[in-house]
Image (cartoon, rainbow, N blue to C red):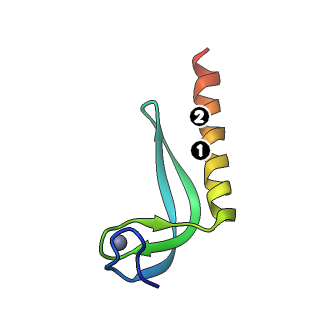
Amino acid sequence: MQCPFCGDGPMVRETRDMPYEYDGHETVIPQVTGDHCTACGEWLFSDKESDRIAAAMLAFNRSITAARS
Ligand SMILES: [Zn+2]
């Protein structure tokens, strides 16, 4: 599969821990699987994985916001 972002690099299926930062706080979203462009470094995720990542980010954001108030 060719990268839809740069149209150049091949996409490679990879699973890795994804670092995420919100408001100066860092966390890691574990075991994220997606297609990774070896040329430009962009990631492409399935709908299901996108939902899981978004949910993990939202939960982390909420925990930061809750701890502040
Ligand atoms: Zn690319």
Residue at 47 percent across and 85 percent down: it is 1
Q: Residue 59: image x %, image y %?
A: 66, 39
Q: Quadrant of ligand 1?
A: bottom left
Q: Residue 7: image x %, image y %?
A: 35, 76
Quadrant of the image containing the C terminus:
top right
Res 10 quadrant in image = bottom left
The answer to whether 5 is drawn above or below residue 10 in the figure is above
Q: Is residue 24 left or right of residue 15?
A: left
Q: Residue 29: image x %, image y %?
A: 56, 54
Name the residue that disc number 2 marks.
61
Between 4 and 64, which is closer to the camera in this rendering? 4
Residue at 62 percent across and 58 percent down: it is 50
Name the residue that disc number 1 marks.
57
Q: Residues within 10 Å of mark 2 (few under 14, many from 20)?
A: some
The answer to whether 24 is drawn above or below residue 53 in the figure is above
The answer for how far apart the CA atoms under marks 2 and 1 are is 6 Å
Q: How many marks?
A: 2
Q: Are marks 2 and 1 in contact (CB under 8 Å)?
A: yes
Which element carries disc 2, helix, strand or loop?
helix
Residue at 35 percent across and 67 percent down: it is 41
Residue at 42 percent across and 72 percent down: it is 4
Q: Residues within 10 Å of mark 1 (few under 14, many from 20)?
A: some
Kind of residue sitting beneath label 1: Met
- Residue at the top extreme, as displayed: 69
